[in-house]
Image (cartoon, helix red, strand yellow):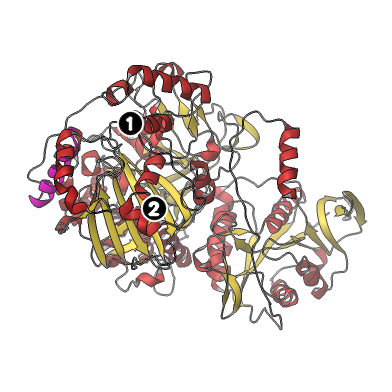
């Protein structure tokens, strides 16, 4: 591709799942106990999308990556300490709830508005990346709606791979039911790619990348606009986290079949 | 690890900082306030990047700035001086100290190792101890009091400080980025080298290899704690000042516990204990907001057990009737461990040199009499920042002389120094025994440091010597065989044999060591980093028994090798407490620890410690 892609990655934070997470009801609806004190991580599906975007941008000269994140400003700032050394991007922040207890359309609307406001973004060269799902609430609908609001008709919603061709077209490998893939040829941008897992490992921390990113991160946080009411008319009847059961035994040299058998019996209860 | 022939990226900054803890929080908070004006415009220009504001970068080993560990009760003089309007409720899990108790715990089990004099004392006070087998001291000496101070979660405090710093935009903090070493050229520190990424366990390049970058700086600020590799490298490179040595250490192990319904301990309560499970083991319990308690024990180097363990002792301590009445039915939320620099002022290194300055616990700032380290560490960071700003304003270079004049002078003239001098030998008496230590500590405090017992140096006793009169040689030999056959440390078997009851797990608070690691510490090890614990001379491990690195390991990350010799190390269980480093009883021919404790990522992943 002669001029490269303009890749916008929609991705935000989720509470670090390793912390003690307890659902509570707040005056603003469902939330997590002591949410302000919980560190956050980049939503793992969004992380796949970001790493794939950075890789694609490196391999197609002239490409550029933006990371558009909708989340509480203070939390986004802390998240950037962990993310900004991983991949080169220009940051766009929208200040609002990333709890997952929001309306997908309202969230998509806020993201689309932020993307439309990106200076220098060529919408004809746009690849809109996001997660096919989210660790905060697995609706799997947001990025598709962002694409629709931006008028993008080519949408791929469980992507594992993109291979660009020299003529500007690209091949997309998507997961479909029955452990099979659907391979599509797309004539060109703009397109929406919602990532499943991708193929790339988490990149190492590169201090120079972090330094460069930080030049856009702090101004972006400073001018982040409030997203407004993201809940719309949604009402949640009840909220609960999955129950956990843990038993520890130390068994050495157990065979694979033996382990599988025990797991199956444990799951059956 | 030095990889010959590898090209490394390099970048220039003005100030490179190693480790983000309370000392670095104090340094960066104070520095950042002088770097921009009220409108956010830079006041000081970068020399490394002309035209840009001063470039200040801080690298932290842990995956997040909130993953520190400490049991913090502090007078908070330095912290409050930095934040005069501080309200404890601004910081999650923080509150004011409202009541303090110091409690002597008697041994309700009869398995504790107590000398004749202590047994006599116990018999004397037993009628006063009641069914809870404890005596609340009627008087807390002034040097121990923290009334009006703060109870903190160090993880939450660090997160609170770090977020304010990042919001200022004046400095950058990068967690998940271990610093391998300082770059030393012609006796001058010129920056740091970050740890290699994308390597095998032995440090050799693997797919995705990214050589650690050289970050060159005119000033390197070292605040990587008592076992940090950069601080120790500087100790080796420049030596220690005459008369300074690092002999007193401790492992601090803690939990954050959700207290059971009906527990009547009010927020702000501080309880310090001594006397149990072994006389030398001190304990603490601090009640935080939201019915949470931060509690734990310190296992010091002067507990001369060759099978010393912290986790098992922590469980026995919690089960003491004085404490268990509050804890029974509680739930562990978090767990962690760290090395404590119990040497304090005695182990103070050169605070400054050409191109570098040292702050915090690793610089000997901990007060071992008052049992306070966070506020002292914070204050040393503030003092350095004030000195650095002065030098920047004058346009003077960061030479040893200039840093001594502007930082070391401030420190010498402060309460950190004067109180540190009083405390310098407060723990020396414990090398002669528990009672001598206790009396010595009290007299040190009451005489302003003018009187203290002299320390003695004793080699670690053999297991047979340690158990003399309690376990016979045949029994010890049997235990050794059993541990070898099972591939487990000796401590549990020895404690069982000495009469300590087995811990009955309740699945909530009394859990297995591995469950504490996973459910409390949430321990992680990011891929692509080398093993940070390396045994330098395997032949020395062959001759070492019991292997104290295995016994003391806070995460059960170091285990006996079924084939004998060098123990096995599992990076995914390591909490980076560094206890293996100073517990190794078999020094190398060079006189150093046979355990090389290097820069590594990961470890504890809980934000509540």
Region in magenta: B432-448
Image check: B128 left or right of A190? left
Helix, strand or loop at label 2? It is: loop
Q: Is residue B556 left or right of residue A40?
A: left
- Camera-side residue: B262 or B224? B262
Q: Is residue A7 magenta?
A: no
Is label 2 in contact with label 1 (beta carbons under 8 Å)? Answer: no
- Vertical side of A129 occupied by A248: above or below: above
Magenta stretch, main secondary structure, is helix
Residue corresponding to mark 2: B21
Q: Are marks 2 and 1 on the same chain?
A: yes
Q: Quadrant of the N terminus of chain A?
A: bottom right
Q: Is residue B523 above or below residue A226?
A: above
Whether residue B603 appears in this view of the structure is no
Report which residue position mark 1 lands on.
B236
Residue A208: percent from left, percent from top: 56, 49
Q: Mark 1: few, some, or many residues within 10 Å (few <14, many ≥20)? A: few
Along the line of sight, the residue nearer the viewer: B550 or B580: B550
First of labels 2, 1 by sequence position: 2
């Amino acid at each position: 591709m002669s001029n490269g892609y303009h890749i916008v990655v929609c991705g935000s934070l989720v509470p670090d799942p390793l912390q003690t997470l307890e659902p509570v009801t707040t005056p603003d609806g469902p939330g997590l106990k002591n949410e302000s004190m919980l560190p956050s991580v980049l939503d793992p599906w969004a992380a796949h999308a970001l790493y794939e975007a950075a890789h694609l941008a490196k391999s197609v000269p002239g490409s550029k990556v933006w990371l558009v994140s909708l989340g509480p400003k203070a939390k986004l700032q802390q998240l950037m300490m962990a993310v900004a050394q991983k991949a080169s991007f220009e940051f766009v922040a929208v200040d609002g709830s990333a709890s997952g207890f929001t309306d997908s359309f309202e969230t998509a609307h806020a993201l689309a508005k932020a993307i439309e406001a990106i200076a220098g973004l060529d919408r004809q060269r746009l690849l809109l990346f996001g997660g096919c799902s989210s660790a905060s609430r697995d609706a799997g609908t947001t990025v598709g709606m962002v694409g629709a609001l931006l008028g993008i008709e080519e949408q791929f919603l469980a992507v594992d791979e993109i291979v660009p061709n020299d003529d500007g077209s690209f091949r997309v490998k998507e997961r479909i039911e029955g452990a099979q893939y659907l391979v599509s040829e797309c004539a060109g941008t703009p397109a929406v790619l919602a990532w499943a897992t991708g193929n790339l490992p988490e990149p190492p921390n590169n201090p120079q990348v972090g330094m460069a990113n930080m030049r856009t991160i702090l101004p972006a946080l400073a001018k982040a606009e409030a997203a407004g009411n993201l809940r719309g008319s949604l009402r949640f009847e009840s909220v609960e986290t999955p129950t956990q059961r843990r038993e520890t035994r130390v068994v050495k040299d157990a065979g694979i079949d033996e382990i599988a058998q025990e797991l199956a019996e444990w799951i059956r209860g | 690890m030095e990889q010959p022939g590898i090209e490394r990226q390099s970048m220039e900054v003005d100030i490179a900082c190693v480790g983000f803890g309370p000392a670095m929080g104090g340094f960066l908070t104070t520095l950042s306030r002088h770097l921009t004006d009220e409108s956010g415009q830079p006041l000081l220009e970068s020399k490394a990047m002309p035209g840009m504001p001063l470039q200040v970068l801080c690298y932290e080993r842990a995956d997040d700035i909130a993953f520190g560990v400490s049991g913090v009760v502090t007078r908070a003089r330095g912290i409050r001086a930095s934040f005069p309007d501080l309200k404890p409720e601004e910081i999650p899990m923080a509150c004011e100290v409202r009541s303090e108790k110091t409690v002597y715990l008697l041994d309700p089990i009869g398995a504790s190792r107590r000398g004749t004099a202590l047994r006599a004392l116990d018999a004397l006070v037993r009628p006063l101890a009641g069914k809870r087998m404890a005596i609340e001291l009627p008087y807390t000496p002034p040097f121990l009091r923290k009334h009006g101070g703060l109870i903190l979660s160090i993880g939450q405090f660090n997160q609170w400080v770090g977020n304010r710093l990042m919001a200022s935009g004046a400095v950058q903090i990068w967690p998940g980025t271990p610093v391998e070493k300082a770059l030393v050229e012609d006796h001058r520190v010129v920056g740091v080298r970050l740890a290699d990424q994308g390597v095998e366990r032995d440090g050799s390049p693997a797919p995705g290899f990214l050589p650690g970058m050289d970050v060159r700086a005119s000033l390197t600020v070292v605040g990587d704690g008592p076992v940090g590799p950069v601080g120790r490298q500087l100790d080796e490179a420049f030596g220690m000042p005459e008369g300074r040595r690092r002999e007193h250490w401790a492992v601090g192990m803690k939990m954050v516990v959700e207290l059971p319904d009906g527990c009547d301990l009010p927020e702000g309560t501080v309880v310090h204990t001594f006397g149990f499970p072994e006389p030398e083991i001190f304990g603490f319990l601090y009640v935080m907001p939201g019915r949470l308690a931060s509690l734990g024990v310190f296992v010091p180097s002067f507990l001369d057990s060759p099978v010393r363990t912290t986790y098992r002792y922590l469980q026995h301590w919690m089960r003491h009737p004085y404490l268990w009445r509050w804890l029974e039915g509680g739930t562990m939320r978090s767990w962690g461990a760290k090395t404590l620099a119990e040497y304090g002022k005695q182990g103070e290194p050169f605070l400054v040199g050409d191109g570098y300055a040292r702050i915090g616990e690793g610089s000997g700032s901990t007060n071992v009499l008052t049992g306070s380290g966070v506020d002292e560490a914070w204050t040393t960071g503030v003092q350095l920042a004030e000195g650095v700003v002065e030098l920047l304003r004058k346009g003077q270079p960061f030479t040893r002389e200039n840093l001594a004049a502007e930082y070391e002078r401030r420190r010498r003239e402060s309460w950190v120094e004067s109180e540190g001098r009083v405390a310098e030998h407060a723990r020396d008496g414990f090398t002669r025994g528990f009672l001598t230590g206790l009396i010595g500590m009290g007299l040190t405090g009451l005489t302003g440091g003018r009187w203290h017992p002299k320390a003695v140096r004793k080699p670690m006793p053999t297991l047979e010597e340690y158990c003399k009169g309690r376990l016979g040689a045949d029994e010890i030999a049997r235990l050794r065989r059993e541990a070898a056959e099972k591939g487990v440390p000796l401590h549990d078997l020895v404690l069982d044999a000495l009469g300590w009851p087995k811990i009955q797990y309740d699945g909530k608070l009394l859990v297995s060591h591995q469950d504490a690691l996973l459910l409390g510490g949430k321990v992680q090890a990011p891929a692509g980093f080398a093993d940070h614990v390396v045994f330098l001379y395997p032949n020395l491990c062959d001759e070492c028994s019991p292997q104290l690195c295995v016994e003391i390991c806070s995460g059960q990350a170091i285990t006996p090798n079924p084939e004998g010799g060098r123990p096995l190390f599992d990076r995914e269980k390591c909490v980076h407490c560094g206890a293996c480093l100073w517990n190794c009883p078999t020094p190398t021919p060079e006189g150093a620890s046979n355990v090389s404790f290097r820069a590594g990522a990961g470890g504890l992943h809980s934000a509540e410690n």
